[in-house]
Amino acid sequence: MSAQEPRRPYTDVTVRDDARGTAILLDTKPLRTPSGTPILAPTRALADAIAAEWRAQPARIDIALAPLTRLLGTALDRVPANRPGVIEELAGYAETELVCHRAAHPPELMRRQTETWQPVLDWFAHAYDAPLAVTTGVLAVTQPQASLFAIRRAISALDDYRLTGLSVAVGAAGSLVIGTALATGRLDPAAAFDAAELDASFQIERWGEDAEATRRRAQLRADLDLAACWSRLIGT
């Protein structure tokens, strides 16, 4: 560390339980969101993981190295202020659901889509009483209104913490079905990545992978890992 670099403004990181949750203290001061909200974790496991992020900070604090902290800040500030919008955005994925749009050719891709996507689509239909129609190609398919209503109702029932985790999982996967399966533990991050990237991986096998695709897929893996970690730490 050079003489010009500021040291961290704290030396000790601890956690403290109270009636509303578990606080993370930097020395004696509670960690807060950018808007000033005290950060209170809903579980001790999440609080311990966030405390570890702050113990591991370098001399010059880098919030990018604290993804769980940023996610909890979102759950405390941004999601409650925009719940209807978040719910609507997530429910909207069902109308253009990735795993419902299958290839018409080649046969190998069709087979992989059926083997990978159909089991998780069947699980989703059973778990949420929300069967979704499958179509071929990019043509839109009208999904059953009863299923869309059941999906919106299930999403609306989530608390802010689980809604936050689902939002990360679905946004990363580009699929409500895959994201929900990840957030609930039905799929692990590796399986979720394989399902979300099935078409891209098929093309890479044939034509190779460029640097931009490599970076994008690495970020996707990191986002799926984060979503799974978050769900595990809040007790989904």
Image (cartoon, rainbow, N blue to C red):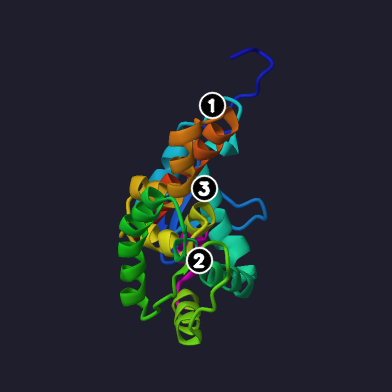
Magenta segment: does it hold 160? yes
Give the residue drawn at x 67%, y 55%.
Answer: 35
Task: From the image, state whether disc 1 or disc 2 is nearer to you.
Answer: 2
What percent of the width, then of the height, locates residue 38? 56, 56
Q: Residue at x 46, y 31 (%)?
A: 56
* Residue placed under numbered mark 3 in the picture: 69
Q: Which mark is residue 58?
A: 1
* 189, 66: nearer the viewer: 189
Residue 174, given in percent of the width and then of the height, sits at 52, 56
From mark 1 to mark 2, how far is it between C-alphas?
41 Å
Q: Which residues are magenta?
A: 157-167
Q: Quadrant of the C terminus?
A: bottom left
The amino acid on which the numbered mark 2 sits, given as a three-letter code, is Glu
Residue lying farthest to the top in this orientation: 2
Tell me the element at label 1. Answer: loop
The residue tagged 2 is 97
- Residue in the foreground of this view, choosing between 41 and 90: 90
Indicate left or right for 34 with 195 as reference.
right
Q: Which quadrant of the figure contains the N terminus? A: top right
Q: Is residue 198 magenta?
A: no
